[in-house]
């Protein structure tokens, strides 16, 4: 389509605003133009934090020599013509604002050759005014050089952060486009140093390796296609999610793309958070790449000046689809964290791996048999392997054998998970097992706890605590959840009362269940019989989220046979 100035009624419908806030915004607009031009190779060079120089070179269609001036006019675009096109935007750009906005605050050199043109053209603009145009030989594609950004806007310059901060923004941005377009070969050079290079082979896992490193990328779980999703009105989700063992301390590692447009979305962040609920420690965040494809009619991309936020027509459907895709992937495929062994020289017998001598660890022993009849019917999403208990280590860890090696199960964390799911289920069905106390216990509360009990005593009752007011600051405890025994009763109740004030009201239910699980679960240091261990493992296999305790810590570690054989040099 030729470049044309949009009609004024279309212009008036465009969400106008500041396009160029900082150097990274220039990079964003130029890279988006290259992608819209169908480029398969995009090179970004930056120096001085993007203030001195930004150069983006692509091998896209190029701009026809006759159109180059038009490209720098406000509201001139080749991507849409009418306002109905606004409803079904399929390109990243559509407003015709970026090039004129950039040219207004920097010196610009455009060198381009359209695929149908024999010769290329170079166009120079200084502070938005034409400063030269010549014919020039050039490869097909476009190279846009932006120099001295914001020199004529000192207020903007002052607002910018250090070179390294601006470089950081640029790197982050290019990273996102690498993830969104694995079939495009990206090269980012900052201050003469190549910092990002992707192969453009179309494989997202390979981009993850290039961006996050081999170890992390290998651990990422691919979202399985949802066979029931049909596209169109309903979002189809693909991408990768990190296992909960790989946690980051901020949300910069959540990448969301809608029809390949990189967007910021609190709704999607929240959907991901919900999906990891109970698997990620508080304050930690996962690495996630979510690609959402949805009919263009279902979204409005014309709501934000830099197009970094969009509006979904059916936000709730998208939320549910995203949350479900991430959760199912985590539950269905998440591997048990594997052990990082660093065993010193094998000549030191004292430092050898602390295994109890057991036939299963000796090569000569027969391969353990898994009798099919003994298999349990699993919940469909649970993929914990069938484990055979070998023994207990330090009265704290259950050692078990699975089809692919040895598993160390933290008995307390594992039992916490079991009890947590059990009490949540019982509470939901209003069927918590209760045990009456022969002698009621007196509970003294602080003024604050007293207030909480008045407003929130109901939650405690649902979980099996029967408390009766007995004075200004005293209550009689007549019945407790059956899973609490002896001295654990008061400890649990005190902690519940203390913590109720710390969490949001909508989290109380869950917090009570967590604390009951913590106090009701077997402790570390407690000796367990073989049968008890087998029972615990069986119950763990039946939980919905067997690999994490309710606080998000792992319940088990895995040491693969391959690893073991490697360590022994077999
Ligand atoms: P928009 O992308 O919203 O159309 P821009 O100001 O970013 O507006 O670009 C104006 C026009 O210039 C585009 O519509 C496109 O036709 C042309 N253009 C800009 N950059 C490139 C490029 N790298 N390759 C080919 N055409 C380009
Ligand atoms: Mg553009």
Image (cartoon, rainbow, N blue to C red):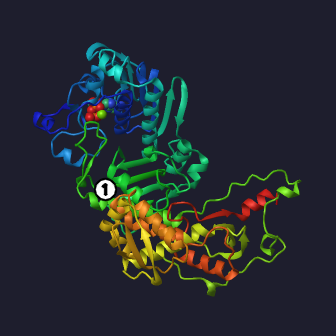
Q: Residue at x 82, y 75 (%)?
A: 365
Mark 1: is the Cβ under 8 angstroms from ligand 1?
no
| The quarter of the displayed image where residue 140 is located | top left
- The answer to whether residue 463 is visible is no
On the picture, is 342 further left or further right than 37? right
Q: Quadrant of ligand 1?
A: top left
What percent of the width, then of the height, locates residue 553?
Answer: 55, 60
Instruction: Sort mark 1 into few (<14), some (14-19) or many (20+) by Cα contacts within 10 Å.
Output: many
Q: Residue at x 28, y 31 (%)?
A: 19
What percent of the width, then of the height, locates residue 436?
Answer: 45, 84
Q: Which residue is drawn at 36% across and 59% down?
A: 448
Q: What element carries label 1?
A: loop
Looking at the rendered image, the quarter that the N terminus falls into is: top left
What percent of the width, then of the height, locates residue 32?
Answer: 35, 36
| The quarter of the displayed image where residue 81 is located | top left
Query: Residue furthest toward the left?
Result: 9
User: Mark 1 highlights which residue?
Assistant: 294
Front residue of this view, candidates 162 and 492: 492
Q: Please determine whether, in this image, residue 269 is positioned above or below residue 112.
A: below
Front residue of this view, candidates 161 and 56: 161
Query: Residue furthest toward the top?
Result: 131
Front residue of this view, candidates 200 and 251: 251
Looking at the rendered image, the quarter that the C terminus falls into is: bottom right
Q: Please determine whether, in this image, residue 303 is positioned above or below residue 385.
A: above
- The answer to whether residue 214 is visible is yes
On the picture, is 291 further left or further right than 14? right
Q: Please determine whether, in this image, residue 431 is positioned above or below residue 165.
A: below
What percent of the width, then of the height, locates residue 43?
Answer: 46, 31
């Amino acid at each position: 389509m030729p470049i044309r100035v949009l009609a004024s009624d279309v212009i008036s419908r465009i969400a106008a605003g500041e396009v160029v806030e900082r150097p990274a915004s220039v990079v964003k607009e130029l890279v988006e133009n290259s992608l819209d031009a169908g480029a398969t190779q995009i090179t970004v060079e930056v120096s001085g934090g993007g203030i001195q120089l930004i150069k983006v070179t692509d091998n896209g269609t190029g701009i026809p020599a006759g159109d180059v001036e038009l490209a720098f006019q406000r509201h001139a675009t080749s991507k849409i013509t009418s306002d109905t096109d606004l409803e079904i935007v399929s390109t990243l750009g559509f407003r015709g604002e970026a090039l004129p906005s950039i040219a207004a605050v920097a010196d610009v050199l455009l060198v381009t050759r359209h695929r149908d043109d024999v010769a290329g053209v170079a166009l120079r603009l200084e502070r938005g005014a034409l400063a030269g145009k010549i014919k020039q030989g050039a490869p097909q594609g476009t190279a846009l050089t932006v120099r001295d950004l914001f020199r004529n806007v000192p207020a903007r310059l002052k607002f910018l952060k250090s070179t390294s901060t601006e470089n950081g923004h640029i790197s982050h941005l290019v990273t996102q486009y690498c993830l969104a377009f694995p079939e495009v070969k990206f090269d980012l050079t900052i201050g003469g140093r190549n910092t990002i290079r992707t192969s453009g082979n179309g494989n997202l896992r390979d981009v993850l390796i290039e961006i996050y490193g081999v170890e992390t990328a290998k651990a990422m779980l691919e979202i399985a296609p949802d066979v029931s999703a049909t596209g169109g009105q309903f979002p189809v989700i693909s991408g990768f999610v990190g296992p909960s063992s790989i946690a980051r301390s901020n949300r910069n590692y959540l990448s969301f793309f809608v029809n390949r447009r990189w967007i910021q979305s609190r709704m999607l962040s929240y959907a991901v958070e919900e999906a990891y609920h109970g698997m990620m420690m508080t304050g930690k965040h996962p690495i996630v790449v979510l690609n959402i494809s949805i009919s263009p009619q279902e979204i409005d991309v014309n709501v934000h000046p830099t197009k970094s936020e969009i509006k979904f027509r059916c936000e709730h459907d998208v939320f549910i689809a995203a949350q479900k895709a991430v959760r199912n992937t985590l539950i269905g495929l998440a591997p048990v964290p594997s052990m990082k062994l660093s065993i010193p020289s094998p000549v030191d017998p004292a430092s050898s791996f602390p295994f109890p001598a057991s036939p299963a660890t000796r090569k000569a022993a027969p391969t353990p048999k898994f009798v099919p009849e003994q298999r349990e019917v699993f919940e469909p999403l649970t993929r914990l392997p069938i484990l055979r208990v070998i023994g207990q280590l330090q009265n704290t860890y259950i050692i078990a054998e699975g089809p692919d090696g040895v598993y160390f199960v933290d008995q307390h964390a594992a039992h916490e998970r079991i009890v947590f799911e059990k009490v949540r289920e019982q509470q939901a069905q209003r069927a918590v097992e209760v045990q009456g106390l022969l002698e009621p216990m007196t509970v003294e509360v602080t003024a604050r706890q007293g207030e909480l009990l008045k407003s929130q005593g109901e939650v405690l009752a649902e979980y099996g605590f029967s408390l009766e007011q007995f004075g200004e600051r005293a209550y009689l405890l007549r019945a407790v959840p059956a899973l609490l025994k002896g001295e654990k009763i008061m400890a649990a109740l005190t902690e519940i009362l203390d913590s109720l004030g710390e969490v949001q009201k909508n989290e109380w239910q869950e917090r009570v269940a967590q604390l009951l699980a913590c106090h009701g679960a077997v402790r570390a240091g407690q000796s367990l019989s073989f049968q008890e261990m087998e029972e615990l493992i069986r119950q763990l296999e039946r939980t919905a989220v067997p690999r994490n305790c309710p606080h998000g810590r792992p319940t088990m570690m895995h040491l693969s046979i391959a690893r073991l054989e490697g360590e022994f040099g077999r």
